[in-house]
Amino acid sequence: MYGKSPMRAVLFLLGIQLTALWPIAAVEIYTPRVLEAVNGTDVRLKCTFSSFAPVGDALTVTWNFRPRDGGPEQFVFYYHVDPFRPMSGRFKDRVVWDGNPERYDVSILLWKLQFDDNGTYTCQVKNPPDVDGLIGEIQLSVVQTVRFSEIHFLALAIGSACALMVIIVIVVVLFQHFRKKRRAERAHKVVEIKSKEEEKLNQEKKVSVYLEDTD
């Protein structure tokens, strides 16, 4: 076969070498892993990805849900060129597209959270030829009130420290202001006393000169 078509044989071998050198295609998924939100509010399920291949019309995104108390996996959302919302089920009219594939963002927005929304949300991205890779997961906990996390405590501590620094600066400025004011008042009193003393001395001199003249 190769004798009849040496050019075809060269192209075949070259194709094998290029295939061997082509990097392994795999999509990397990034999610917050654990998420907590208040019942009745809206929450953004963030999912981003990285891919060796450029993003095009072949990109597909699939969101599914596994209830925490068990049960079959449920469809949440699908994206391929355009977003496709669920036409029935628990997520009907409660989920919207909030992503931007050009920025490698395939997030969705879930409205009006309920306690039975507790569970695992999976985000699967395929960007041919990158079709392999792990599926992103988000463990969502719907609660009555959000508990204080370490970030909240850190923000509170930083805010308190900043407020304390502002108060200290204000106190120092006011102290210096009143201190300068008292010094100015004292200096003014000293000037007044000296003026009075000088005036008194002048009066005494005038009296003594008058007495000498009368003598």
Image (cartoon, grey):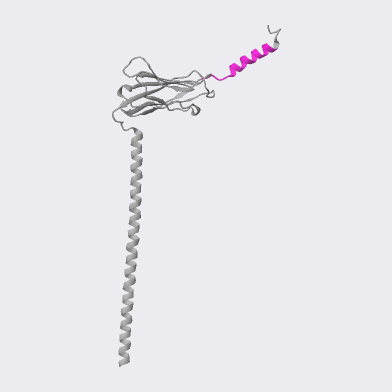
Above or below, comparing residue 145 to residue 169 in the picture: above
Q: For this rendering, which residue is in front, 153 or 146?
A: 146
- Indicate the position of residue 192 as horizontal and vertical percent values: 32, 72
* Identity of the residue furthest to the left in this view: 144
Residue at 70% in and 11% down: 6
Report the magenta stretch's main SS. Answer: helix
Residue 92 shown in magenta: no
- Indicate the position of residue 135 as horizontal and vertical percent values: 44, 20
- Indicate the position of residue 186 as horizontal and vertical percent values: 32, 66
Q: Quadrant of residue 65?
A: top left
Q: Which residues are magenta?
A: 7-25
Residue at 64% in and 12% down: 12
- Indicate the position of residue 136 as horizontal and vertical percent values: 43, 22
Residue at 59% in and 16% down: 19
Residue at 33% in and 77% down: 198
Q: Quadrant of the C terminus?
A: bottom left
Give the mark count. 0
Q: Quadrant of residue 33?
A: top left
Above or below, comparing residue 131 to residue 39 in the picture: above
Q: Quadrant of the N terminus?
A: top right
